[in-house]
Image (cartoon, coloured by chain):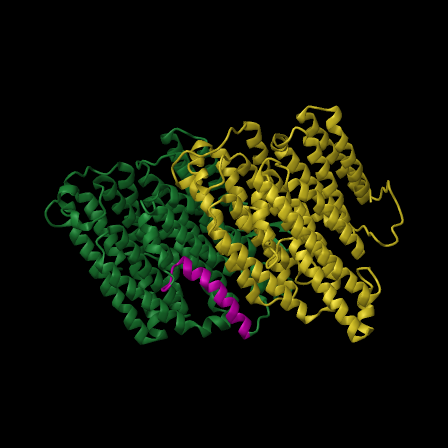
């Protein structure tokens, strides 16, 4: 509860901040300070110190997993703002507005990590999405950005409608919005009611797939990611997406049992389609930004493994994957923001011009590709292990593994450009300070690549 | 403690060298540290060494366990001998960013040592990959003209293979009683026959690509040819042994049923590969490609011998693992000296080395004889035992594989003839006496060839415990 209230208050505060405080730097620092307060408020609740304690009538339920997910998402946002603050300022002279929107998104995130009721899921998704539509169109003078925002808004609203329809059907079938109770009802209920619930769940499934850009609901992703200002693409592809996944897992780790066997077929189809579309199309991209958009679809395919079934490590695996993937993606977009163009050729000769930057970029790419000694390896490892523990066949793991090998191809294209192709990198001015910030991210990935426990141990306190 | 220092000494050296811009100093530091590693390895030989055991990933039940038995020590010794030899003999070669080159080479050494020591499946996988990544950069930055594409092919091949192995590790792990990755639990895992065959296949693909076994060998000759010679030496002397080591350490004890079920299939594949590689070697004009194909043939023969599952053949392989490494490093060093000085790898343009540089020619002939496994050389001991085992397994296979001895004689002696004898060619005429370091290394290696060829008992003693574990249950 603390996080929901505090993030809203901070959002409102940031909104008015641009009146009094003109300095972009001060606005960024205020946002960072706000994020620290938010993290502390959330930690306070995790340690049993409820500042805001309302009876939500079972709409919200706070557990260790949800609160820890909050902390991680806020910490990722902190890293995100810390690295991208200057770029955000460049987009408008009222950057505080953007920070305010980010705080509202975090409010949506905190709802999504704690909902215990389908209505709260709906509200959470909406709070998360609407600021994202605005952020997509933040570059007002750019046609692509406008187009992307409109496209995202239309498609997003449509999928929200489907989500609502699904919730309604479930209510019709079970008489309740709650996450857990309907199961008992369904098993004793009549055929029509079971059908209603099943149909509702499938609709929710489709809508959630849209939100996390899983195939065949992924068509908006490349255009929106490409059109949105790169800084906000970075936010959309990481924190917003991770929150979507946490909500996804929360719904279906309790509900899917109702669908039984057919659910597995449906999910397997979506997983394979997502891996296929993401990986294969990414291979043919000429723009790094679009390649990353498709790679984010491919990564979503891996994250869907967490839904496959409940095992003792499915919570761990989704959190680890979300964090590691987000850090690497924030990092690689942080490099991309500074490039003058988005082509692979822009990276030519970067290793010679700037060895440190090339090294950090390589670590980000290694992590995305899942190479050992980076966090990405354990993220993928946990997902595969979860899959096996949840009872999937070995063949599905082999499919995943083959796609992981394909992903090497497009991630290493950047490495090849940086290290093995001579040329002048098309890179803008890069302050040393900024490089060290990126280096910190790379080091975090390396540490998680040896000791992922540092992140996961807190789940057990 | 000694095991973990063996692992971290090369890492320390790699980091240190990275900051030394002076070429000479960097070279000396690298050589000094690799010599220290060798000393440490020599320390471990006589006595049993306590395992190094540290909690690593408690959630996954994986521990950081290093264990050294005879097999590990043998390969550690090979690694520890080859690295100083390679570093000394190529010290005069010009590389851009010399310090980065050396640093990556030392990281590779650390990865290799880790592979040979890890007694935990996840840790093993970790090092397996770590040994690969520096090599990827080494070959792609410092290699020949077509280096980028060819190295990438090599990388994707091996990476896909190791991902299959990872799936296999996961699969076996799910069937262990205590859900741990320790090798003992893996051995005791309760797998049905079908499951054994599945996991066997997953592991075997990774090892077969690494060795490589026909028909998965296509990456190798190109990669050997395009890599800088120092890296080629590491790859052919030590890295290919990772595959054979994997079979001895993991495949044989873990899946005894599946192993026995596939003996004929794999032996047949290997023998096809041996003959195929030998025939291609005969047609080669490029000296590097010739050695590459000859290496495929030798490794294939070792793999065939392993899969006979006879004690005598496996004993032969244990000797040959070491001997082949020494011989092939010797051959590469000679080839590298010639290439560096004359700028050509085509044997047609060579000739008359014996007249121009008699010492080098004698050394070349020495290693060439070892390559055909002449009695008194180290390979003879190993190959004799291996053929013995192959004969016990299936005389026809032994006969077919035996052809490779004749073929090896043809291509190796052909090479000696073209390079060492005949009129002094234009290119060879430009050659200077090779530097003292390279010569000294070659002489030491050649001494090793004949010493272990005449008196191989230390190697038998060293690997006795591994052999016992594999065959006395």
Magenta segment's dominant SS is helix
> Which quarter of the picture shows residue B23?
top left
Q: Position of residue A166 (x, y in %)?
A: 74, 61
Q: Nearer the viewer, residue A245 or B176?
A: A245
Residue A331 visible in rendering: no
Seen at 81% across and 75% down, the residue is: A190
Seen at 82% across and 60% down, the residue is: A177
Q: Is residue A415 left or right of residue A256?
A: left
Q: How many marks?
A: 0
Q: Nearer the viewer, residue B212 or B124?
A: B212
> Which quarter of the picture shows residue B399?
bottom left
Q: Nearer the viewer, residue A25 or A322?
A: A25
Q: Position of residue A419 (x, y in %)?
A: 42, 40
Residue B92 visible in rendering: yes
Q: Position of residue B254 (x, y in %)?
A: 52, 66
Seen at 62% across and 66% down, the residue is: A392
Q: Nearer the viewer, residue A35 or A387?
A: A35
Q: Is residue B264 above or below residue B153?
A: below
Magenta-colored span: B193-215
* Chain A as rendered: colour: yellow
Q: Is residue A446 above or below residue A275?
A: above
* Chain B as rendered: colour: green
Seen at 42% across and 70% down, the residue is: B309
> Which quarter of the picture shows residue B344?
top left
User: Can residue B209 be found in the magenta stretch?
Assistant: yes
User: Can residue B146 be found in the magenta stretch?
Assistant: no
Quarter in which the N terminus of chain B is drawn: top right
Q: Position of residue A450 (x, y in %)?
A: 59, 46
Q: Is residue B263 left or right of residue A49?
A: left
- Looking at this view, name the residue that lies furthest to the left: B423
């Amino acid at each position: 509860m603390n996080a929901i209230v505090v993030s809203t208050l901070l959002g409102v505060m940031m909104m008015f901040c641009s009146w009094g405080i003109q300095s972009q730097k001060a606005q960024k620092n205020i946002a960072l300070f706000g994020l620290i307060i938010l993290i502390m408020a959330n930690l306070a609740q995790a340690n049993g110190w409820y500042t805001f304690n309302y009876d939500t009538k079972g709409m919200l339920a706070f557990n260790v997993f949800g609160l820890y997910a909050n902390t991680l998402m806020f910490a990722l946002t902190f890293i995100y703002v810390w690295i991208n603050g200057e770029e955000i300022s460049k987009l408008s002279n009222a950057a505080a507005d953007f920070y305010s929107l980010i705080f509202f998104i975090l409010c949506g995130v905190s709802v999504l990590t704690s909902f215990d009721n389908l209505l709260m899921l709906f509200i959470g998704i909406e709070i998360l999405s609407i600021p994202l539509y605005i952020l997509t169109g933040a570059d007002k003078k750019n046609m692509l950005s406008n187009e992307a925002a409109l496209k995202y808004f239309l498609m997003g609203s449509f999928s929200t409608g489907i989500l609502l329809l699904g919730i309604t059907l479930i209510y019709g079938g079970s008489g309740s919005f709650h996450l857990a109770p309907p199961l008992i009802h369904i098993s004793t209920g009549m055929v029509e009611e079971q059908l209603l619930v099943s149909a509702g769940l499938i609709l929710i499934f489709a809508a959630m797939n849209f939100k996390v850009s899983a195939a065949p609901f992924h068509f908006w992703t490349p255009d929106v990611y490409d059109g949105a200002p790169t800084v906000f693409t970075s936010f959309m592809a990481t924190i917003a997406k991770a929150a979507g996944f946490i909500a996804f897992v929360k719904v279906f780790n309790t509900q899917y049992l109702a669908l039984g066997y057919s659910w597995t077929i449906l999910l397997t189809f979506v997983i394979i389609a997502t891996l296929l579309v993401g990986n294969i199309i990414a291979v043919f991209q000429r723009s790094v930004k679009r390649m990353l958009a498709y790679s984010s679809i491919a990564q979503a395919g891996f994250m869907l493994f967490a839904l496959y079934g409940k095992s003792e490590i499915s919570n761990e695996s989704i959190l680890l994957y979300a964090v590691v993937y987000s850090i690497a993606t924030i990092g690689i977009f942080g490099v991309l923001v500074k490039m003058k163009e988005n082509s692979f050729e822009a990276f030519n000769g970067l290793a010679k011009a700037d060895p440190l930057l090339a090294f950090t970029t390589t670590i980000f790419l290694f992590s995305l590709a899942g190479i050992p000694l980076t966090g990405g390896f354990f993220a993928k490892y946990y997902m595969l292990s979860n899959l096996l523990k949840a009872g999937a066949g070995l063949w599905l793991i082999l499919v995943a593994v083959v796609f992981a090998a394909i992903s090497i191809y497009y991630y290493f294209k950047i490495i090849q450009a940086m290290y093995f192709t001579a040329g002048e990198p098309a890179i803008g001015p890069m302050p040393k300070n900024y490089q060290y910030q990126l280096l910190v991210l790379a080091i975090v990935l390396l540490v998680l690549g040896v000791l992922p426990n540092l992140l996961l141990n807190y789940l057990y306190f | 403690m000694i095991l973990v220092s063996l692992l971290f000494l090369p890492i320390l050296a790699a980091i240190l060298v990275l900051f030394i811009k002076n070429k000479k100093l960097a070279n000396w530091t690298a050589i000094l540290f690799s010599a220290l590693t060798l000393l440490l390895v020599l320390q471990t030989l006589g006595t049993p060494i306590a395992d190094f055991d540290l909690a690593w990933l408690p959630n996954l039940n994986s521990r950081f366990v290093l264990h050294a038995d005879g097999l590990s020590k043998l390969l550690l010794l090979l690694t520890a001998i080859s690295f100083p030899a390679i570093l000394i003999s190529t010290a005069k070669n010009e590389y851009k960013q010399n310090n980065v080159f050396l640093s990556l080479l030392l990281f590779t050494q650390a990865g290799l040592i880790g592979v040979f020591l890890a007694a935990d499946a996840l840790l093993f996988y970790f090092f397996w990959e770590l040994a690969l990544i520096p090599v990827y950069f080494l070959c792609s930055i410092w290699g020949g003209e077509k280096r980028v594409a060819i190295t990438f092919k090599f990388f994707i091949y091996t990476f896909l293979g190791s991902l299959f192995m990872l799936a296999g590790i996961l699969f076996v792990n799910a069937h262990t009683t205590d859900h741990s990755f320790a090798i003992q639990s893996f051995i005791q895992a309760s797998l049905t026959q079908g499951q054994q065959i599945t996991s066997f296949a997953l592991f075997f693909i990774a090892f077969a690509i690494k060795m490589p076994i026909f028909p998965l060998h296509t990456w190798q000759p190109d990669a050997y040819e395009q890599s800088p010679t120092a890296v080629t030496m590491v790859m052919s002397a030590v890295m290919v042994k990772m595959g054979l080591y994997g079979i001895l350490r993991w495949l044989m004890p873990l899946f005894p049923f599946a192993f026995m079920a596939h003996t004929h299939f794999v032996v047949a594949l290997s023998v096809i590969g041996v003959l195929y590689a030998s025939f291609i070697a005969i047609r080669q004009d490029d000296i590097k490609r010739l050695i590459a194909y000859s290496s495929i043939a030798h490794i294939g023969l070792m793999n065939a011998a392993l899969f006979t599952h006879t004690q005598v053949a496996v004993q032969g392989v244990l000797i040959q693992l070491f001997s082949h490494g020494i011989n092939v490093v010797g051959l590469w060093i000679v080839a590298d000296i010639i290439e560096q000085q004359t700028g050509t790898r085509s044997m047609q343009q060579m000739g008359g080395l014996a007249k121009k540089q008699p010492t080098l020619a004698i050394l070349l002939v020495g290693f060439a004889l070892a390559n055909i496994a002449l009695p008194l050389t180290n390979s003879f001991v190993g190959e004799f035992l291996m053929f013995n085992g192959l004969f016990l397994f299936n005389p026809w296979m032994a006969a077919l594989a035996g052809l490779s001895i004749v073929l090896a004689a043809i291509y190796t002696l052909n090479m000696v003839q073209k390079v060492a004898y005949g009129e002094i060619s234009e290119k060879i005429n430009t050659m200077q006496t090779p530097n003292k370091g390279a010569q000294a290394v070659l002489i030491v290696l050649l001494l090793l060839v004949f010493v272990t060829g005449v008196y191989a008992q230390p190697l038998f003693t060293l690997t006795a415990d591994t052999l016992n574990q594999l065959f006395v249950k």
